[in-house]
C-alpha cells in the first residue's frame, strides 16, 4: 500500500524536508510513504487528483475533521488497508484551505489539532503520526 502526503504548496524549508525524509526512510519495509508537493493549484494538480481511482482514499486535512489519538489513528489506517485501499492520500491545503477539487472528492477529513497549523508544521506532525501508526500496527515499541 502507498500512503501519500500531498501539499497544495511547495515545501522549501530544509529542516522540514530533512525531517520528513528521515521518516520516509524509517518506514521502508512497513509502507511506502511519498510526499508529493504542488507549487500551486495548476492543471497537473487537478490531473493528479482526478487520476485517483475509487480504491484510492483521499483524506483532506481540515480543522473540522475527525480527531484521533495515536492508537485510534493507527486503527483507522489499518481499517483502510483492510478495505483494500490501494493508496491513502492525505491532502494538506494551501493558506486558503483545501481546494474545491479535494473537497469534491474527499472520503473523509482529518484534524491534527484545534489550532490552525501551517502546512509545514502539518507535514511534520502528519509524517510522524503515520510513522507512529505503522509502528503500532506492526507491534513495534516506538509508540510508547
Image (cartoon, rainbow, N blue to C red):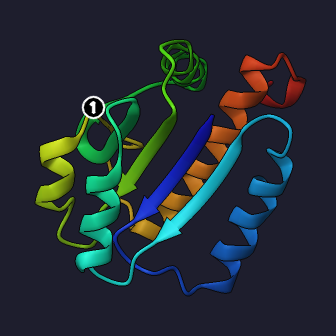
Residue 3 quadrant = top right
Residue 41 makes an appearance in the image = no
On the image, the x and y values in percent for residue 114 come to 31, 43
Q: Is residue 63 above or below residue 132?
A: below
On the image, the x and y values in percent for residue 105 come to 19, 43
Label 1 residue SS: strand
Residue 107 makes an appearance in the image = yes
Q: Which of the two residues, 84 or 20, is positioned nearer the viewer here?
A: 84
Q: Is residue 139 left or right of residue 81?
A: right
Q: Residue at x 23, y 40 (%)?
A: 106
Q: Quadrant of the N terminus?
A: top right
Q: Is residue 125 above or below residue 48?
A: above
Residue at the spot of label 1: 108
On the image, the x and y values in percent for residue 12 come to 55, 87
Q: Residue at x 17, y 62 (%)?
A: 99
How many numbered marks does the figure carry?
1
Q: Which of the two residues, 20 or 112, is positioned nearer the viewer here?
A: 20
Q: Quadrant of the C terminus?
A: top right
Q: Residue at x 48, y 20 (%)?
A: 80
The local crowd at label 1, few if under 14, some if 14 to 19, many if 20 or more residues have their Cα within 10 Å, is: some
Q: Which of the two residues, 56 or 8, is positioned nearer the viewer here?
A: 56
Residue 92 quadrant = bottom left
Q: Is residue 13 left or right of residue 58?
A: right
On the image, the x and y values in percent for residue 5 come to 50, 55
Q: Residue at x 39, y 68 (%)?
A: 118
Amino acid at each position: 500500500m502507498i500512503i501519500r502526503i500531498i501539499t497544495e504548496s511547495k515545501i522549501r524549508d530544509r529542516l522540514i524536508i530533512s525531517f520528513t525524509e528521515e521518516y520516509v526512510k524509517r518506514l521502508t519495509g512497513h509502507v511506502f510513504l511519498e510526499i508529493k508537493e504542488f507549487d500551486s493549484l495548476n492543471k497537473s494538480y487537478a490531473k493528479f487528483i482526478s487520476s485517483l481511482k475509487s480504491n484510492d482514499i483521499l483524506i483532506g486535512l481540515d480543522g473540522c475533521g475527525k480527531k484521533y489519538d495515536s492508537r485510534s489513528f493507527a486503527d483507522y489506517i489499518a481499517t483502510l488497508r483492510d478495505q483494500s485501499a490501494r493508496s491513502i492520500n492525505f491532502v494538506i491545503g494551501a493558506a486558503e484551505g483545501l481546494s474545491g477539487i479535494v473537497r469534491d472528492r474527499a472520503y473523509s477529513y482529518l484534524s491534527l489539532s484545534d489550532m490552525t497549523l501551517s502546512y509545514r508544521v502539518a507535514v511534520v506532525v502528519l509524517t510522524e503520526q503515520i510513522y507512529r501508526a505503522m509502528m503500532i500496527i506492526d507491534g513495534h515499541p516506538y509508540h510508547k
